[in-house]
Amino acid sequence: MPLTDYFHKIKNTFGGEKQKYSIGYQMRGDYGDTDFTAMVDKYRDRISEVFFPMPGDSSGRPPVGSGIKKDIMELLAVFCKDLDALHEIGVPGVLLFNSACYGGNAVSYGLFNHVKDSIEMVRKHIDLIALTTMSMPIAEFVKMNFKELPVRASVNMYLEDVGQMSLASRYFDGFYLGREVNRDMARIKRIREWCDAHGKSLHLLANSGCLHHCPFKHFHLNASAHYRDLEKSDSPTTVNSFLCSRELANPENHVCILRSSWIRPEDIHHYTGLVDTVKLAMRSTEHPENVLKAYCDEKWDGDLLELLEPGYGNIQNMPVFRNDRFPKDWFDHTAHCGHHCETCHYCEEVLKKVVSG
């Protein structure tokens, strides 16, 4: 057992620090039947915050309530009731305005008024501790009008180094690491030092299923955010518009899943202290408690794809990725490999061990 893992095990045995999580809100009935507030209450000691967009808003995911046959006022009523319940059990909230596109409204009074009204509404129901956005105008508006509310730069800004964060530091109080940085421990430590020196918080998304440096990621996020519009549009429904699903239908590309940015629950302890919060994507997963339980237990014996968002388990001929079959050197290798995939065949060898079919 590596020395760092040994000390981690001893620390946990005697009640040491456990990683806490920022989790995505899901309205009951939108994707499954999970009672979200009951789930949060069950794992309360491991949850630092809940993040959410306003119902109906675009945010890099289908809008909250897309799967529920209610009008926007009915959805808002359910949403506010859920926020009240979260407040009762002492969980704070983080409001998302992280759409990749606001179109012609991107710098409009209408958008700024919506941001203002949303902040004021949410604050009536939950302790709002931050706002996350990928829009510089929104960040600037919030810092001018809600000075006490920290603003975080969204993971969808793909901030991967100190130079990028330095350019954006005037507008943001904290930064989500770009997904592709997750497996570069040396760079995370360097960014952490810069954030500490400049009074910035640092955050990380642990279970993204997005493919490494996917060239269609921006398109995918934008299309997902406009889910309702796409449903109504006149388009060839037989065409799969998302590169990841289309290319992963080819078994030769299954190795790309292993090359991505997700962090196994068994390895999450390596990030304790390096980031202020670990974010778990679960806004559009059918079984969000599986994700939360796996990361709280720091162990998962099922299909790794069930923990990821997107997870790809519904793609034809996709095998099960047995999380309990990963080699012991997985983290040590992938956290320092530099993603030289064209000359390294480590992931191809791991794929043979973990898939079952």
Image (cartoon, rainbow, N blue to C red):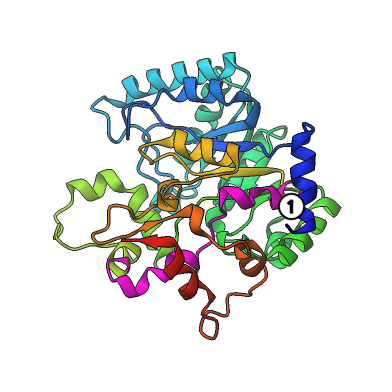
Whole-percent x, y for residue 317 in the image? 25, 62
Q: Is residue 162 visible?
A: no
Q: Nearer the viewer, residue 263 or 72?
A: 263
Q: Nearer the viewer, residue 187 or 162?
A: 187
Which residue is at a point 58% across and 18% down the rendered structure image?
Answer: 87
> Is 81 located above or below residue 238 in the figure?
above
Q: Is residue 191 visible?
A: yes
Q: Residue furthest right?
A: 197
Quarter of the image holding residue 123?
A: top right
Q: Residue furthest front?
A: 1
Which residue is at a point 43% across and 39% down the rendered structure image?
Answer: 283
Residue 47 left/right relative to 79: right
Which residue is at a point 76% across and 46% down the rendered structure image?
Answer: 8
Q: Which residues are magenta?
A: 248-273
Residue marked by disc 1: 5
Which residue is at a point 32% across and 20% down the rendered structure image?
Answer: 74
Whole-percent x, y for residue 102 in the image? 42, 49
Whole-percent x, y for residue 57 in the image? 40, 38
Residue 308 left/right relative to 43: left
The amino acid pointed to by label 1 is Asp
Count of numbered badges drawn on the protein: 1
> Is 274 located above or below residue 90 in the figure?
below
CA neighbours of label 1 inside 10 A, class few (<14), some (14 to 19), many (20+): few
Q: Please identify the quadrant where the N terminus is shown.
A: bottom right
Q: Residue furthest bottom?
A: 343
> Is 268 located above or below residue 145 in the figure?
below
User: Which element is circle 1 on?
Assistant: helix
Whole-percent x, y for residue 163 in the image? 72, 67
| Residue 40 among those drawn in magenta | no
